[in-house]
Image: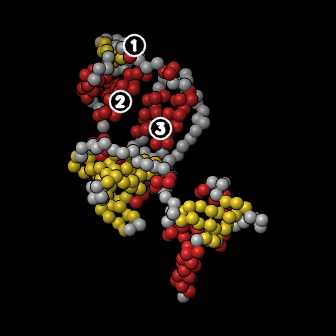
Amino acid sequence: MKIDRLIGILSVLLQEETVTAPELAERFEVSRRTINRDIDDLLYAGIPIRTTQGVGGGISIADGYKVDRTILTSKDMQMILAGLRSLDSISGSGYYGQLMEKLQVGSSDFVSGRDSILIDLSSWYKESLAPKIETIQDAIANRHLITFTYYGPKGESKRKIEPYYVVFKWSSWYVWGRCLARKDFRLFKLNRMDKVKETKTEFVARSVPVPDLSTERIFPGGIRVKALFAPEVKWRLVEEFGPECFNETKDGNLLFEREYTNEDNLISWILTFGDKAEILEPEDMREKFITTLKNIQTKYKGE
């Protein structure tokens, strides 16, 4: 995109004393004529760019406009680079890697070679996530509607939304946008989205409410569950709910008490523990769990 190239050219000019048009053309894989137009656009935007002819000449920015890199400490730069690496781990374009290279040019004097924070946001779904994220980002930048098939607990549906934010939360990726069918803002999980397409239909950006990403808002309670777990699964309870979610009984078992969101999700979760868990309360959930176990047994009885 042109705006990305303009930002890239400006970044190079801020980092290097002088650069030639052919060098910029080669770096950004465009023609020299395109670079000349880009320089004109930067001039129109108020960037004080100078061009000089002859040996040692080239394109540069007036000294007074240069960024004083001392405002960024080594720790600041490590945080910036860690964030860029995390985004590059799910990017299919390599854009963030290129941006890291631009930031590191001429910065070796205050960026140490040792990385203290490494973040990898990729998952089993990296191959399918990267193109979805790129499509949604392009649609947000172009103010275009997107369409997709969405698979939810109530079945699949065709959706068309105004996209505003790509969100990473609870170890998953989401898009926050206004659903045209529901006439309201919704959070859609990317792994449940299929056939994501950017349309040519433009929309006028609204005053967008920032999504409430609090755990209480997205995963409200409602079921006060009490369950008993074997000590062998303590690590899972700590990982998923923290060390304060249970009390150890005299016989070493773990008494778990917690607000849970959904009956079906609760049953599915307890089943993942096999015979290492037992629902104690509420009584109706205990009965539903027993019914589920009987139905499972019936399915396998013939075998």
Q: List the single residue furthest toward the right.
A: 250
- Looking at marks 1 and 3 on the same chain, the residue that comes earlier in the sequence is marked by 1
| Residue with the mark numbered 1 | 63
Residue 133 image position (x, y, % from top left) = 38, 48
On residue 84, which mark appears?
3
* Residue 230 as seen in the image, left or right of residue 76: right
Q: Nearer the viewer, residue 56 or 197?
A: 197
- Quarter of the rendering occupied by the C terminus: bottom right
Q: Decide which of tag 3 and tag 2 comes sooner along the chain.
A: 2
Q: Amino acid at mark 1?
A: Asp
CB atoms at circles 1 and 3 under 8 Å apart?
Answer: no
Q: Which residue is mark 2?
A: 7
Q: Give neighbour class at mark 1: few <14, some 14-19, many 20+ (Cα, 10 Å).
A: few
Q: Is residue 138 visible?
A: no
From this view, report whether residue 99 is shown above or below residue 19: below
Tell me the CA gap for discs 3 and 2: 16 Å
Give residue 149's quadrant in the image.
Answer: bottom left
Are the residues flagged by discs 3 and 2 in contact, CB closer than 8 Å?
no
Q: Is residue 37 visible?
A: yes
Specify the amino acid type for callout 2: Ile
Q: CA distance from mark 2 to mark 1?
A: 18 Å
Give x and y (percent) for residue 216. Answer: 50, 54
Where does residue 218 sit, x and y in percent of width and height?
46, 55
For badge 3, the amino acid type reads: Leu
Q: Position of residue 102 (x, y in %)?
A: 44, 29
Q: Give the secondary structure at mark 1.
A: helix
